[in-house]
Amino acid sequence: MDIDYIKTLQPEKIAEEVYKKNVELL
């Protein structure tokens, strides 16, 4: 994802996406 797209998201949505990515890495 590009930075401008991330900036348009709500903090909760960003946290959710980051959490999902971290879970996939485990």
Image (cartoon, rainbow, N blue to C red):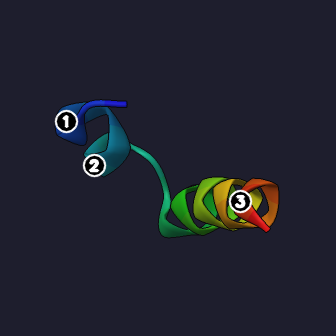
Q: Position of residue 25 (x, y in %)?
A: 71, 59
- At x 37%, y 31%, the residue is 1
For the residues labelled 1 and 2, say whether their Cβ atoms are less than 8 Å apart.
Answer: yes
Locate residue 4: give its quadrant.
Answer: top left
Disc 1 crowd rating (10 Å Cα; few below 14, some 14-19, many 20+) is few
- At x 27%, y 49%, the residue is 7
Q: State the residue lying farthest toward the left.
A: 4
Which SS class for mark 2?
Answer: helix
For the residues labelled 2 and 3, say whether their Cβ atoms are less than 8 Å apart.
Answer: no
Disc 2 crowd rating (10 Å Cα; few below 14, some 14-19, many 20+) is few
Three-letter residue code for mark 2: Lys
Q: Is residue 9 above or below residue 12?
A: above
Could you say which is closer to the camera, residue 9 or residue 2?
2
Where does the C terminus fall, quadrant-wise? bottom right
Q: Which residue is mark 3?
A: 25
Which SS class for mark 3?
Answer: helix
Q: Earlier in the sequence, mark 2 or mark 3?
A: 2
- At x 80%, y 64%, the residue is 23
Q: Which residue is mark 2?
A: 7
Locate residue 12: give its quadrant.
Answer: bottom right
The tag on residue 4 is: 1
Judge from the rendering whether residue 24 lies leftward or rightward of residue 21; answer left or right. right
Three-letter residue code for mark 3: Leu
User: How far apart, in angstroms, are the residues tagged by discs 1 and 2?
Assistant: 5 Å
Could you say which is closer to the camera, residue 22 or residue 1?
22
